[in-house]
Image: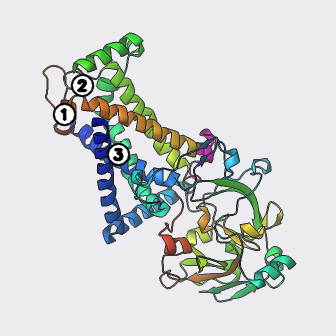
Amino acid sequence: MKHRLSTRLWHWMNAIVIVVLFMSGLNISNAHRYLYWGNYGFDPADAWARVVRFPAWATIPQRYDLAEARDWHSLAAWPFALGLLLIWAAMLANGHFRQRLSTRPADWTPRAFIASLRAHARGAGDVDSGYSPVQRILYGMVLGVLLPAMVLTGLAISPGIEPAMPWLVDILGGRQSARSLHFIAAWGLFGFVVIHVVLALTDWRRIGAMVTGGRRKEGIDG
Amino acid sequence: MVEIGRRGLLAGLAALGAGACSKIADSETGRSIFNAAEGWHRAAHRALAGKQGLAPEYAPEDRSPGFRGNGSVTVDSDFYRGEMASGFPAWRLMIGGLVDQPLALSLADLRALPQRSQITRHDCVEGWSAIGEWTGPQLATLLDAAKLREEARFIIFRCADTLYGRPYYESIDMVDAFHPQTIIAHALNGEPLPEKNGAPLRARIERQLGYKHAKYLTGIDAVASLDDIGAGKGGFWEDFAGYQWYAGI
């Protein structure tokens, strides 16, 4: 299986952008380390979660600076959101989604999960053939749920967007709920990235393939 | 200890990238890219919501049980303490700058104008939110009464409070100045404005974050440019710590 140029460009651009968003986001989180449900929330006594203070080495910039962190976050939000929109348009137009990411009911069974993991451990998988059911589900969830959730919850906590889409804040359960969901989805994405990087490191060919496109194997890639 | 080695490597890479980030942020080019991104957000928000699009308003039962005071929570002067104790009889809001009819308005003058009450949500840049009912005349009413001149492009809010030894001030453009929800509030939840929330007067700029909502108002100036005011970036936090002038995100 060969990775398309559009996939590779988006993948690496998005990787950089996500690191900037995540690390500047940790800096922003340090400004008020309490999360609430509903529309309002300012009293730590009403918080459902008290967040740890993230250390300076984990944040952008490398000291507590809410203003500069917001500069990075607001800048990186553009390539993140527009990139996601473009890659979805490309995936739907060029058949990537249908061929490589869509699943059948049989892919969601424990048997398919175990078979995928065994195949991955053997070193088979995406470099040689198509994505396994586990990969299809994981990538589908990231592309279809977690990444759009980051964009939508981010829009919802921007007061300048709200007059245009008040319904977005409402369906998320209010502004502070949207802020909590933004935080939860960010850590969901962090979890994915950790698993993704660990699995990719088990076979360097996979990383090479995401750079060069990889080998083209007859009859598999259209 | 491979584990520590890998962790050290990751931390090193993070520090390297973040070091590059601060170089970019401190550079002229970096600054202009940040400003451009801020401008795109403002343009996108206004294209999507329209210049007069309203921030959501809530029902009385949606109000938060309290309303946090943040930043300055008082004005440190004998005049202020005396006024606070006696209901601000001598407090005046001076409307000047690029206007044909400068005004000096007392609280009674402001209360005699047509009033707008709105239950809105206040979002601080730090992340928290509170909901309360604000009452006061629309800024547009005051600017019309003062006969705003054509060349005015920004409205400056002058404040009695100081932070870190500097006078607080803020500014908005004419889109926000003439927005129906932009009011000069003298009441919160039906009571005169509490001291920590900016007594006797504060601006409400409902589509932007809290630091734009200047408190302890003493004056409103119409100007053509922000360059000669403060350090020229349009507000206390903008000048002092590099916060974004457009705070709609």
The span from disc 2 to disc 1 (Cα, nearest Å) is 9 Å
Q: Is residue B225 above or below residue A124?
A: below
Range of magenta residues: A161-177
Q: Residues within 10 Å of mark 2 (few under 14, many from 20)?
A: some
Circle 2 SS class: loop
The span from disc 1 to disc 3 (Cα, nearest Å) is 21 Å
Give the position of the N terminus of chain A as an image quadrant. Answer: top left
Q: Which mark is residue A126?
A: 2
Picture quadrant of residue A85: top left
Picture quadrant of residue A171: top right
**Do labels 2 and 1 touch, CB within 8 Å?**
yes
Would you say B60 lies left or right of B143 here?
right
Circle 1 SS class: helix
Q: Is residue A111 above or below residue B206?
A: above
Which comes before the other along the chain, label 1 or label 3? 3
Residue named by callout 1? A209
Kind of residue indicated by mark 3: Gly
Point 26% across, 37% down: residue:
A7
Which comes before the other along the chain, label 2 or label 1? 2
